[in-house]
Image: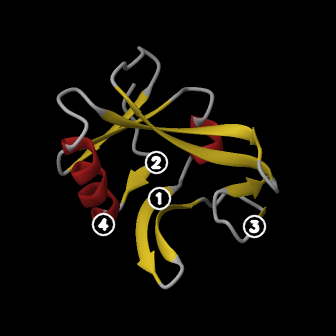
Amino acid sequence: MTDSSVTISERAARRIGEILKGEGNGAMLRISVEGGGCSGFQYKFDVDRAQTDDDLVIARDGAVVLVDSASVPFLAGSEVDFVDDLIGASFRVNNPNATSGCGCGTSFSM
């Protein structure tokens, strides 16, 4: 499944590529949405080597990101970015579907 509804910024692609290089051949980053967190839903980031037929596959600058089909509706229209600021370096999901979030940046509600 290929779709452009979720995008990866250049900074995020560069950082994902650096992380995956250290994980060996066939490593991909999986982003999923799970129930929980302080606002109802939370983003989860894992290194994965197995792609399923219904995964959304996003490739940019050597970085490969997978999103499972259940998480795609929660992430539609989102951009994954990498931010390195005073409070630390982290991936940030700029999600237009989120109606509110929390200070940690990994939890949101719809």
Q: Which mark is residue 102?
A: 3
Question: Residue 63 at x, y = what percent?
Answer: 25, 45
Question: SS of the residue at dot 4?
Answer: helix
As shown in the figure, which amino acid type bears the numbered disc 3? Cys
Q: Residue at x 40, y 24 (%)?
A: 1
Q: Is residue 108 above or below residue 3?
A: below
Determine the residue located farthest toward the top in the rendered image: 53
Label 1 crowd bin: few (<14), some (14–19), many (20+), radius 10 Å: some
Observer-side mark, 3 or 2, equals 3
**Label 3 Cα neighbours within 10 Å, binned few <14 / some 14-19 / many ≥20:** few
**Which kind of residue does numbered mark 1 sit on?**
Glu
Q: Amino acid at mark 4?
A: Arg
Query: Which mark is on residue 11?
Result: 4
Question: What's the CA distance linking mark 2 and mark 4?
Answer: 15 Å
Q: CB atoms at circles 4 and 1 under 8 Å apart?
A: no
Q: Which residue position is annotated with label 2?
A: 6
Indicate the quadrant where residue 48 lies.
Answer: top left
Q: Which residue is mark 1?
A: 79
